[in-house]
């Protein structure tokens, strides 16, 4: 007959369960300390649920170019993703140097979500029916600011994360200076993960929008192009909203790490931290499929002709 588990194994299992329950209690306690934190938790949960529902539709049930993205959807979803970031800023500790990288991910999130929702209301997502023109001086300045903001975020992740070897050494060996290691011990790994999980996709959208907005004739032709291919409107609007969700999802993951509900990657759980990159690859495949296959390829060929004939 199989032998019963040893008392030591039972004790370790019990301590692990107790520690996990304590971490979960601390996490929920931190989110319900006062009215602002309760509001942040509610809006944050709404952002996750709305984002997951939208991602499920465009990735699994249908596609980016087939799910209609109305102005009402953009406004509601954009407001939720933006407000959750605004409500979370007051909880950041800007005085703690070891949280500099987390802060660099957190406080720009509502600004970026606002841009992603706003650009979906311009010619980028509405064609000639745009509520805002992305060629306007204010919106162009807002786009430039957001591009520079993503570059600054990348530089902070590169400089402020990981474990660095300090120059000061003891009698035996050099000391290690631990910074804000969000995920990996090497800052380059953190920077690559953050860049290709969501920063690069924001930079790509912002850079393309800025390129189009700098030329009035190109912007006019782009608006006509969007009217001729409504699926391109859905594609770009759904992509922008999904990017805003991924931005908030990265912030949420960093919060789980801070409260130790998710462990930093070691050999046994590094696969968990590969999910953002794998998800990004899958999304890119879906987006490119929609872009090149819609209207039997006429949409993509017209877009390239438009862009390179500036």
Image (tube, rainbow, N blue to C red):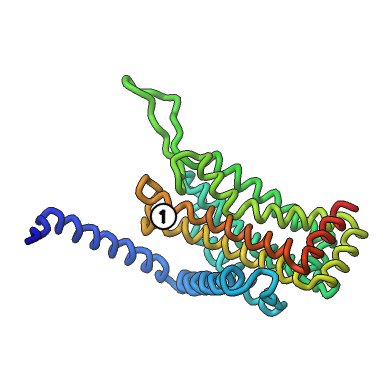
Residue at the spot x=59%, y=68% of the render? Answer: 59
Q: Nearer the viewer, residue 138 or 1?
A: 1
Examine the image and state in which quarter residue 4 appears: bottom left
Asked where in the image residue 112 lies, by quadrant, the reply is bottom right
Q: Residue 160: where, in percent of width, then height? A: 52, 41
Q: Residues within 10 Å of mark 1 (few under 14, many from 20)?
A: some
- Asked if residue 106 lies left or right of residue 13, the reply is right
Q: Residue 36 appears at what percent x and percent y?
A: 49, 71
Q: Is residue 39 left or right of residue 132?
A: left
Figure check: 275 above or below 56 = above
Q: Residue at x 24, y 62 (%)?
A: 17
Q: Does residue 180 show up?
A: yes
- Point 69% across, 65% down: residue: 290
Residue found farthest to the top: 171
Q: Which residue is mark 1?
A: 258
How many numbered marks appear?
A: 1
Indicate the position of residue 108 as horizontal and vertical percent values.
Answer: 61, 56
Q: Does residue 114 appear anywhere in the picture? A: no
Element assignment for label 1: helix
Left or right: residue 296 compared with residue 7: right
Which residue is the extreme one toward the front? 296
x%, y% of residue 61? 58, 74
């Amino acid at each position: 007959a199989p032998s019963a588990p040893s008392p030591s194994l039972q004790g370790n299992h019990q301590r692990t369960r107790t520690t996990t329950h304590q971490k979960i209690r601390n996490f929920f306690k931190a989110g319900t300390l006062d009215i602002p934190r309760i509001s942040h938790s509610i809006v944050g949960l709404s952002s996750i649920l709305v984002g997951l529902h939208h991602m499920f539709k465009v990735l699994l049930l249908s596609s980016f170019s087939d799910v209609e993205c109305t102005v009402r959807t953009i406004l509601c979803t954009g407001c939720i993703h933006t407000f959750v970031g605004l409500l979370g800023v007051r909880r950041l500790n800007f005085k703690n140097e070891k949280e500099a990288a987390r802060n660099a991910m957190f406080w720009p999130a509502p600004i970026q979500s606002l841009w992603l929702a706003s650009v979906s209301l311009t010619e980028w997502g509405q064609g000639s029916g745009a509520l805002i023109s992305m060629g306007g001086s204010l919106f162009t300045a807002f786009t430039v600011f957001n591009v520079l903001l993503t570059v600054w975020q990348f530089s902070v992740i590169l400089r402020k994360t990981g474990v660095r070897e300090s120059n000061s050494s003891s009698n035996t060996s050099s000391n290690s200076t631990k910074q804000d290691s969000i995920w990996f011990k090497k800052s380059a790994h953190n920077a690559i993960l953050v860049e290709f999980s969501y920063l690069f996709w924001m930079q790509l959208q912002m850079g393309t929008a800025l390129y189009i907005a700098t030329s009035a004739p190109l912007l006019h032709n782009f608006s006509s192009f969007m009217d001729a291919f409504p699926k391109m409107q859905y594609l770009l609007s759904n992509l922008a909203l999904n990017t805003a969700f991924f931005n908030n999802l990265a912030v949420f993951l960093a919060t789980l790490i801070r409260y130790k509900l998710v462990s930093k990657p070691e050999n046994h759980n590094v696969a968990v931290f590969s999910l953002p990159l794998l998800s990004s690859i899958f999304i890119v495949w879906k987006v490119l499929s929609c872009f090149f296959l819609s209207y039997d390829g006429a949409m993509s060929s017209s877009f390239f002709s438009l862009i390179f004939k500036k």
